Amino acid sequence: MTASSARTHAPSAAADPAHYLRIEGVRKEFDGFVAVDDVSLDIRKGEIFALLGGSGSGKSTLLRCLAGFERPTRGRIVLDGEVMNERPPYERPINMMFQSYALFPHMSVEQNIAFGLKQDGLAKDAIGRRVGEMLELVQLGKLARRKPHQLSGGQQQRVALARSLAKGPKLLLLDEPMGALDKKLRSRMQLELVNIIEQSGVTCVMVTHDQEEAMTMATRIAVMDQGWIQQVGRPDDIYEQPASRFVAGFIGSVNLIEGAIEEDRPEYVVLRTGDFPAPIYIGHGITGYEGQPVAFALRPEKVHIGKDEPPGDSNKARGTVEDIAYFGSHSVFHVRLPSGAKILANFANMKRWDSDGITWNDPVWVSWGEDDGVVLTA
């Protein structure tokens, strides 16, 4: 049910809060297939850290290595100054909340929360106090005697979380924590779950394939692909400053335009691309060379769309509205350029049916500012 310690673990005197959980060159192979490829990470005490990636990226395998369900082929996992590699799951000060929650259907809410404490042989009054604290933390005191089938999906999730936190683990692992919830409930529970975890003070590593979930819940994110860590950073850093084409395309929606550096100066860069007749001007220098192939990543919300030609001789293109996707708060315009390339532009719907009179098949101009995009060399 859980990967949890059956004994009390004193904090290590050597532990550094900035390196509370250390993943040092961890590699995991299955019959010659490399699922996790020499991953190294430092996770801070008290933070919520997300492993984000698609199917086969290695994120779940890495989580199972942390839990002790898989043993790394090589590398070390160090938690609070103690090496975890040789410890079985039940001897690690770690608890894991599974996507299915794995609640005992024949037990009440309070019995589910108390299960691990009873397994550890705690006194009855100590168990009662701890269960009461957990029920208060997740705000389920009035439902303590209900069975799991009498609870909503969000309530079941909070019971599973309370059970995972009851033993005071040094590390909480979340495996696709919102996967069993519908979209509307998932959005509400993301912040609720964060609040509970922050109140408990536990360090948390979560696995998800949902970019919005990672961006909403995590302090920092590691984007994984094919067993590798592609980028680590705060949600805004990864979104605004992706390190590669893969990260730019995986996180959110992006216009990814291939081109080459025409001019590189300390204060600006000029790119040329076959997609636009006008050059792309970036208002700062980069580490590159003239003629170097690069990609220009431009988020749709940074693209301006209008019927009049923008001033200047760069960072603009003329095209035709091919499609419009309405999302309530904003609309996404798909603009086809003469080169055949497509540019996505977001338009905020400030009032009902407000789109500046732009509709399908209209000729329009798209433009952007000199600091609105990112040059990618990888």
Image (cartoon, grey):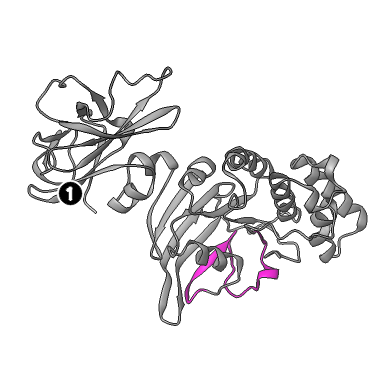
Quick one: quadrant of the C terminus? Answer: bottom left
Task: Indicate the position of residue 148 as horizontal and vertical percent values.
Answer: 78, 53
Residue 120 sits in quarter: bottom right
Q: Which residues are magenta?
A: 72-97
Residue 257 as seen in the image, left or right of residue 166: left
Res. 18 visible in picture: no
Locate residue 276, reporting x and y percent: 12, 38
Residue at (86, 65) in percent of width and height: 121
Near-viewer residue (316 or 269): 316
Figure quadrant of the N terminus: bottom right
The residue that disc 1 covers is 294
Compare residues 322 and 90 and report the one nearer the observer: 322
Q: Is residue 5 above or below residue 333?
A: below
* Residue 66 belongs to the span the image colors magenta: no
16 or 363: nearer the eye?
363
Q: Amino acid at mark 1?
A: Val
Q: Is residue 94 magenta?
A: yes
Q: Is residue 41 left or right of residue 114?
A: left
Q: Is the residue marked by circle 1 packed among few (<14), some (14-19), or many (20+) residues within 10 Å?
A: many
Query: In this view, which residue lies farthest toward the bottom?
Result: 31
